[in-house]
Image (tube, rainbow, N blue to C red):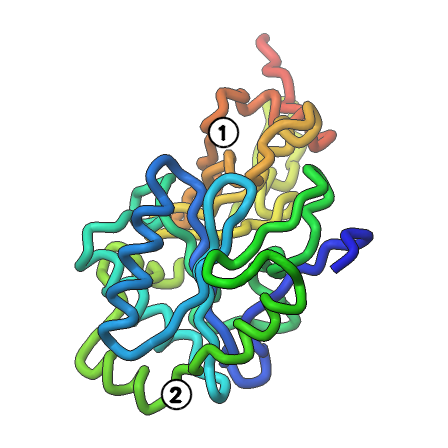
Amino acid sequence: MDGEHTINLYSIHPGTQRSKWVAIDADYDGCMKDLLQLRYELKQDSIQAALGQSRRGGHLWIFAETPLLAADCRIYIYNLALRLGIPVQGGGLREGIEVFPKQDTLEGKSFGNGIRGPLGVHRRVRRRYWFIEAEQNPERQMVYLGKIAKVTEDQIKTFTVGMTMPEAYQPPPPVVYTPGPVHHSDGEIRREFRILDYVRPRTKDRRNYWAQCPSCAHANTDKSQDNLAIQIANPRFYKCWAGCTKEDVRAALGQPVPSRRFA
């Protein structure tokens, strides 16, 4: 709360695949209008949502009475947003709302994706971002949050009967990719370079993983950490949407593209 540290919140408990809250993050032109529309439609379903400001847009928070299945939360919000014509990141869109939790389930010891906790002082701009329906002091903000009705599992189950995740946002079928050895003209056999051995995807859509571009990171750009698209079906194919070449990416990883030898 004093701004000395930034708290990053992770929504999914990996042991239960459930979340105690849902957050909708938007930071594009006109996003506050979309968040207000979402909040209004949620209210029609008797779901209260707290709208807070952020550095570039806003965050809409929904709190649960008991932890809810992440998959059910996502199905509800994605279908609601698309019915309203509100863009959702993924499914071919680079710009739109982001929904936390960003996964239906977590595997192994992964945490999923985090979001900055509300009410703290943003360390970069030294500013606190408030919820818009309460007085701008921490005590009144906490009182406001304590009075918000929490959504129940019965409500979510009722709203999602017969629903599935929209097709464009469904995870692709698993593809087992086994790289083979690379034969060079001098007879040497080398292991094929695999980009996923060096970068960790942050998100994915039907076609691609999205990760921070190593070349952009080296140049201290790619603040959103999602410039690099890696094809899920065949991770040999990857592209930096900020314009870095394959050679740039490989060089930043310390794995330069081998020069071709000609007889």
Residue reaching furthest right?
A: 4
Gap in angstroms between the C-alphas marked 1 and 2 = 42 Å
Which percent across, then down, holds residue 1?
74, 60
Amino acid at dot 1: Cys
Residue at figure coordinates x 46%, y 61% from the top left: 133
Q: Is residue 1 left or right of residue 93?
A: right
125 shown above or below 90 = above
Q: Quadrant of residue 125?
A: top right
SS at mark 2 in the image: loop
The residue carrying pointer 1 sits among few (fewer than 14), some (14 to 19) or many (20 or more) residues within 10 Å by Cα, namely many
Q: Name the side, left or right, on which 113 lies relative to 103.
A: right
Disc ID at residue 152? 2
Q: Residue at x 46, y 50 (%)?
A: 58
Element class at badge 1:
strand
Residue 90 spot, x, y in % from top left: 35, 49
**Figure label count:** 2
Q: Is residue 186 above or below residue 101?
A: above
Q: Is residue 193 visible?
A: yes
Could you tell me if the residues under marks 1 and 2 are in contact, i.e. CB atoms within 8 Å? no
**Residue 102 appears in the picture as rendered:** no
* Residue 232 or residue 205, whichever sits in front: 205
Camera-side residue of 182 and 187: 182
| Residue identifier under label 1 | 240
